[in-house]
Amino acid sequence: MTEYKIALVGFGGVNRGLAQLIAERNATWQAELGFSLSIVGVTDLFLGSIIDRNGLDASTLASLPAAKGAFAQLPGGSAEAFNEAVIKQSGADIVAEATFTNPVDGEPAATFCRWALEAGKHVVTTNKGPIALHGAELKQLAKANGVAFEYEGSVMSGTPVLRLANKTLAGAEVRGFEGILNGTSNYVLTRMEEGLSFDEAVAKAQELGYAEADPSADVDGYDVRLKVVILANELLDAHLQVSDVACNGIRGISSADIERVRDSGARWKLIGSARREDDGSVRASVEARLLPSWHPLIGISGATNAVSFETALLGAVTVSGPGAGRIETAFALLSDIVAIHASRHKA
Amino acid sequence: MTEYKIALVGFGGVNRGLAQLIAERNATWQAELGFSLSIVGVTDLFLGSIIDRNGLDASTLASLPAAKGAFAQLPGGSAEAFNEAVIKQSGADIVAEATFTNPVDGEPAATFCRWALEAGKHVVTTNKGPIALHGAELKQLAKANGVAFEYEGSVMSGTPVLRLANKTLAGAEVRGFEGILNGTSNYVLTRMEEGLSFDEAVAKAQELGYAEADPSADVDGYDVRLKVVILANELLDAHLQVSDVACNGIRGISSADIERVRDSGARWKLIGSARREDDGSVRASVEARLLPSWHPLIGISGATNAVSFETALLGAVTVSGPGAGRIETAFALLSDIVAIHASRHKA
C-alpha cells in the first residue's frame, strides 16, 4: 500500500472538498484504489497556512472556519500564507493547486506550479489559468523533472474529458470537438427557452450562485475560451494562445431568436470548438450556434456541460456531466492522483 | 518500439476491419501509440485459415473475397478452419476473438478464449457471449496465466464505456447505470415518433441492415440483457447470470403511447439498467421506460447508444457514441491493445 503526502495550495471549496473526501474515504481508497493520502501542508492567501510533515487531521482541516487567518487557530498554524514553504518544505509528494483562475497571466498559480515541479513534486490542478496560458512550459518542466502534471479538473470539473480523449480514445484519431463548456450560459439559454428574458435569466443564475455579480466571463464566452485553448492544445496538439480564439458570447441571442426556432427542435447553444483542418492548422472559436435537432449536444440543458469529439474511427463520441461543483471538482484532483498512481504501478 | 503478433479468430466484418486498419495505419501507430501489429494467423469457420509466423500482408487479408474456403486461395492457406492451431501455434502474443455471439452458451467463442488464455496469450474480444456467460471464469483464467483479457467492444462497440467507468471514473463510486444499448430498437422508437407504426419501423430497420430477419434479439431486449449483465458484473461487482435480469422489449409500446407524450418532451426508450441497492444487492432490468424531458438519455436518437452512470461524487456522467459498425468495433479491439500496451510500459 502506498501513502502519498499531499500539500494543498488554495483552500477554497475545491481543496476543502478534497480534505473532506480524505477524511471520509481514505480507508476505502487504500482498499479500492491502492493508495491513501496524508495532508502535510495547506496554504491559502486568506486563511493562512500550516505544515506538519507527519500529517494533519483531514477532518479538522475540512471544518476550519472560513475566517481570515483561521489557520492560526490550529496548533502550529499561521495567519500568514507561507506558500513557498508549504510547496517546497512540507515533504509533499504531490501538490494540489486550486487557487483562483487568473485569465490574464495565470498568476500566482503558475508560479506555484513551477515551484512544485522544480522541486520534483507531482502537480494536480483544477486551475484553467496556468494550463491555458503556460501549459506547454509547465508540461515541459514536469517532464524535465520526471514528475506528473495533471489537470483533468481544468475542463468540466471531475467529468473525465481530457483523460477520455487522451487515454480511452487513443488511436481513434480525434479531429476536433464541440463543447458546451459553461454551465451558467447554458442555464441562461435554457431559462430563456422557458420564456425569461436574458436579463431575467442572468438574475436567476446569480440568485442560484451560478453567475458572478459581473456575469461577463460566463455570458461573453471568456471562460469557455480558456477551456477551448486547453482542449485544443491537449487533444489536437495545437499551439493556440488565448488571443487566437475568436470569442463571442450569448448577449446577441434574443428571446425572439429563441422563439423563432422553438418548434423546429433546433436550439441555440454557446459552443466552444476546435478542428484540425486539412492543411494541418487548427481553427478554434467560441460562439452561439443554432444546433439542429439531431446534434449530439442538443439535449444538454441547464448547468450540465458536455463535449462531443469528432473522431476518424468512431464518428462522434460525446461525454456529459457536471461542469462545476465543490466535490465534483475535488474528484478531478483525486482522478489525477489515480492516474499518477496507475502510471507508476503497472499491472 | 514494440511489435505485437496477433491472431484473428473469426474474419467477418470486425476482424476484417482490424486488418484494414492495420494495412492503413500500422506506421502511424508505431509513432503515435508506440506499437505496431503483425498478423500471424487468421481463422474463420466459413473462410478457412492461414498461419505465417513471419507475418501476413494485412492488405491482402482485408481484401480477401467473402467466399467459402477463400483462404485456400492464398499461399499456405486452407479452406479448413484450424482454430486451435491458429490460436496456439501461430506464435501470437494477442488473440483477437470476433466470432458470432452465441447467447445460449457463448460457444465456440468461450472455448477459443480459454485456449488462448491457457496458452499464455492476451485476449481481446468484441463478443458479448463469452463475457456475459463466462466472464468471471475467463478473467480468473487470464489472471492465473498472467495475461490480459479485454473486451471493451462487447458493449457499445468502440465507444469507451467499460474503460471510462473502470479507469477514468475510478474513485467516483459508480452506484448504477441506465443505458440505451441497442441501436436497432432505438432506431425503431425514433421512427415511430416520426409517425411510422412498429411494423413499418422494423421493416425500415431491416431495409437499412440494422435489424435481422428475426428482429427479436433487438426489439425484445435480449441483446440489451447481455450488455446489462456485462456492465453490472464489471462496474458494480455483481455476480449476475443472464436469467437474473427481467427482460421486456418494445413490442408493448404502441403508436398511441408515443402520440400521447409527444408534446410533453418525454420519450419512450428501451433502457437497460442496474443499481446497487442499500443492502448491497444489485437489481438489473431491461424495459421500455418513459424518460422525462430532463433525463440525460433523452436526446439519444436513432442508432446511437449511450450509458449514463450514476456516481456518488459526480452525479450523472453520460457517454454516447456508436453502438455498432465494422470499423467502430474494430477500434474496440485496437483500444484493448492500447490498454494492454499501456499496462506493460510504464510512464
Image (cartoon, coloured by chain):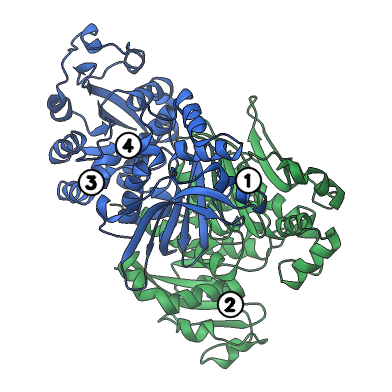
Chain colours: A green, B blue
Note whether A123 is above or below A317 in the view shown: below
Task: Label 3: state its secondary structure.
Answer: helix
Note whether A34 is above or below B301 in the view shown: below
Q: Residues within 10 Å of mark 2 (few under 14, many from 20)?
A: many
Please name whichever residue, A29 or B62, is drawn nearer the observer in this view of the structure.
B62
Could you tell me the amino acid type at mark 2? Thr
Tell me the distance, in whole angstroms, between the alpha carbons under discs 2 and 1. Answer: 39 Å
Specify whether disc 1 shares its chain with disc 3: no
Foreground mark, 2 or 1, reads 1
Residue at (23, 41) in percent of width and height:
B130
Task: Label 2: state its secondary structure.
Answer: strand
Please name whichever residue, B280 or A209, is drawn nearer the observer in this view of the structure.
B280
For mark 4, name the chain. Answer: B
Residue at (77, 69) in percent of width and height:
A206
Tell me the distance, in whole angstroms, between the alpha carbons under discs 1 and 3. Answer: 35 Å
Foreground mark, 3 or 2, reads 3
Image mark for residue A297: 1
